[in-house]
Amino acid sequence: MSAETNAHAAHEEHEEGSIWPAIVGLNTVALIAGLILLLKGIYTTVGLILVFYFIAVVVVFVAFEVRQWQHVISSFFERLQKTPIPAEPEKIGSVGFPTALFLLTEAAFFASAFGAYFLIRSTFPVWPPPGAPHLENFIPRIQTIILLTSSVTIELAVWSAKRGNNRGVLAGILATMVLGIVFMGLKLGIEWPRLIYELGFTPASGFYGSSFYILTGVHGAHVVGGIIVLAIAAGRAKLGHFKPKSHGFLDAVSLYWNFVDLIWLMLFLIIWEGAFLW
Amino acid sequence: MTRVRYVEWGTIIGAAILFAYIGIASWFTVSQFEAQAQEADITIEVRARQFAWEFIYPDGTRSAELRVKAGQTVKLELISEDVIHSLYIRDFGLKKDVVPGQVNVLTFTPMKPGEYVIQCAEFCGSGHSNMLAKLIVE
Amino acid sequence: MTTAQTHVERRHTPWYKSLRRILTTTHHTEIGMLYFAFSYIFLIVGGLFALWMRWELATPEGNVVDANFYNSLFTVHGTLMIFFWATPVFFGFANYMVPKMIGAPDLYYPKLNALSFWLLPVAAALLLIGWPNISWTGYAPLTVIQPDIGVDMWILSLHIVGTSSIIGSLNFIVTIWRLRRPGINFSNMPLFVWSIAVTAFIIILAVPVLAFGLTLLLLDRNFGTQFYIPEGGGDPILWQHLFWFFGHPEVYILVLPAMGIISEILPRLVKRPIYGYKAIAYSTVLIGVLGFGVWAHHMFTTGMSIKALAPFMLMTMAVAIPSGIKVINWEATLYGGKIRFNTPTLFTLSFIGTFIVGGITGVFHAGIPVDFHLQDTYFVVGHFHLILFGAISQAAFAATYYYFPHFTKRMYSETLGKVHFISANVGQYLLYIPMLALGLLGMPRRYYEYLPEFQGLHALATFGAILIGVGTIIFLLNLLISWKKGPAASPDPWDAAKNGMPDFMGEAMNEAEAQRHG
């Protein structure tokens, strides 16, 4: 009896199996090799090629996955229906719990970042340390407004999805993406170059500089990650995947985006001198 | 099965009492160490680098071995020039890390004259195991 | 009888013969087997490194390898055994058993599950090629000033392992929450599932902290940032905080699944239901929670003040209490049980015994003045090896023997199993008791050469290590040969179902229900 079910399950799984996890997993070796070459500054072209090769692998993988997603969910749903586990679509499709767990790891990551920052900051007699440049908070204020607006636009996309307005979903996602790109553009295009080239304030200028760049940099990386998942969401919206009753991915993206927004507000309050007086 | 209950609660409460005792005793022992540092007879600066110890006495003399007098309370100021080391006097059961960027203090009062070994107890590189020095109590 | 024949028939197209099958599978039992193969390979590799070190330490002067190579040996041995043996082997068990225990068809995200396995070989290869010599704790600023490219590879390798375990843990938590069949809830869920749930939560909260610390280290090494360098206002102690905030919960990441699996197999082996189900389940949660409050007990000698350290001392001792509760409940299960002297039972018993010895030697470190003497000596090495080899690895051995008939439908050789048991247990006490003694005498760890007065104990330890090595080789040969040629095993090899405790609760409930319906 058990052998039959086992064999059956194994057979079924054989068809459902996928080569992609192995491809992506094993190709991280290219990513790492590229990163090491870039870090050490030797054969940087080869390094860049390797990193982009890995990114291409992931993009192809995601492109395939996005098409299959609905099929994967429905076949999983069918498999569940053969078991006594209640297979309610809203429970299976809902991503609230997995996203919350993922954000828990992100929260742990940022908690350690803030913890480390305050641990060292508390050892300084005066903060900012003497000699450090005054960090202008004009651009961060604009960035704050941008991110707060983007939280509204992503919620607009979710709201449209609930009402079945696919164009509204697409518009909301694209607006959020544009705001995210503008945010990163202000940071990487104006703020950082100004600090580095005009004020000579680099990651190597003491703990003050290091902590500024790590905190804003890690946050920026999360914004970039957000833009990428927004792009995926836009692709899925274009394929019409988001239905009024099933738009879990969009929910997850909006949760993540709001979380990143929240982190920005905390950074804004602690990093730029006098920002909290605003 | 109530007997198991008794054993279980007995162990929990017994362990808790034992741990509370260890905690309080540790608190007083360590506080005593910290108080000792206030009334040291001699302060010696210790410089640790890969892979040697250097002791600088109050009169400015430098030496590769630590010479102290029996019965005298010695305060060592531990300074690292490169990475983390740890000054370990095994016969006294004392150990303090030598951390770059901060000055740690180790206080002790040797009683018995003789020769002891100072070892490095924090991994500091290829010569870690050769980072030994002599402690001579006169 | 017919079932046994079907099992054997299935072996005509075995999974291991087909590379394609290995690369494409997303089924949880097969991923579990891949985890096993991976972790046992690295048990051998890490074990060989350990023997190499012991061979070097048999004499006081360094004459087998040079100092840097020796340092690399213990670095790679430590990292390997923790991240590529003890963690993945229990991930393997969890993969195979959790869905069966809760009656689920598979994990919630099968492809992510496969991905979290396929990240591991890359990480392991990076570690072995990098061959860093910084000790597994990688204390800054030594790691910052070490110019080797190997250190960067070590950092990135840990990043990948961390990613892999976070993905795996998310998967397990969602699976346990969402795919439990009706009738299995938090008051009767198998204890192994409990321990995996708690472990997964520890992983998703602790590993990101390590990832952040490693990122800072990478930046310090390559971009001149000053997080761990005192010149620019950074602090080397920051690395220790970040590392041990991950590092101590990591100990519970390793030990909780071992405890969980022992709580599963012990009652089935002694034919008596587990005593104190609730106490064991809640103590698992308690250990997980308290485990986050003890990290600074690795830093008693760094010059922090007694006021900052005292809470950590108390928390450390407090963690011993839930561990003690578990031990008492296992012993209560044994009390009045029918103890069979087969290999898994013997290993289960030795797990409990060694866990007590290893655990009590751990409590010594909690007292701050005692730790001033013991910190970074061989006493620490002896203590955590008693837990990591004596308890955790032996729990993995016990469970491997216990579930071997389920995995392969064949039986292993009981005689060779007992030889393995004797050599592992005699060997471990010959190896680790001298280490404890050496530590008390004041032999610091990570020493390539040592003072001649310690030679006797070191030689004894080397002898013990060789015994363990021989036993482990016998063990793996036993498994490999029995896998091909062993006698067919019955589907209920330990009479667990007959005694009302089927090995895989959810699967048994599913089958019972299927029979009822037709």
Image (spheres, grey):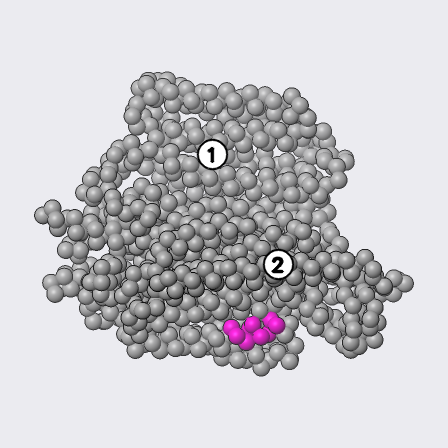
Q: Is residue A16 above or below residue C444?
A: above
Q: Helix, strand or loop at disc 1?
A: helix
Residue at the limit of the structure toward the right, as seen here: B59
Tell me, yes or no, if residue C226 can be seen here. Answer: no
Residues marked 1 and 2, same chain? no
Name the mark nearer the viewer: 1 or 2.
Answer: 2
- Identified by mark 2, the residue type is Gly
- Percent across and percent down for residue A196 are 67, 33
Q: Is residue C101 left or right of residue C326?
A: left
Residue at the limit of the structure toward the bottom, as seen here: C456
Circle 2 residues within 10 Å: few <14, some 14–19, many ≥20 = many
- Percent across and percent down for residue C467 are 44, 77
- Identified by mark 1, the residue type is Gly
- Please tell me whether residue C436 belongs to the stretch shown in magenta: yes
Examine the image and state in which quarter residue C280 appears. bottom left
The residue sitting at 72% across, 41% down in the picture is: A124
- Percent across and percent down for residue C421 are 37, 74
Q: Is residue C409 left or right of residue B16?
A: left
The residue sitting at 69% across, 64% down in the picture is: B95
**Foreground: A272 or C498?**
C498
Tell me, yes or no, if residue C317 can be seen here. Answer: yes
Give the Cα distance between marks 1 and 2. Answer: 47 Å
> In terms of secondary structure, what is the magenta stretch mainly?
helix
- In the image, which residues are magenta? C432-440
Q: Quadrant of the N terminus of chain C?
A: bottom left
- Please tell me whether residue C449 belongs to the stretch shown in magenta: no
Q: Is residue C292 left or right of residue C518?
A: right
Residue receiving disc 2: B23
Q: Is residue C320 above or below residue A262?
A: below
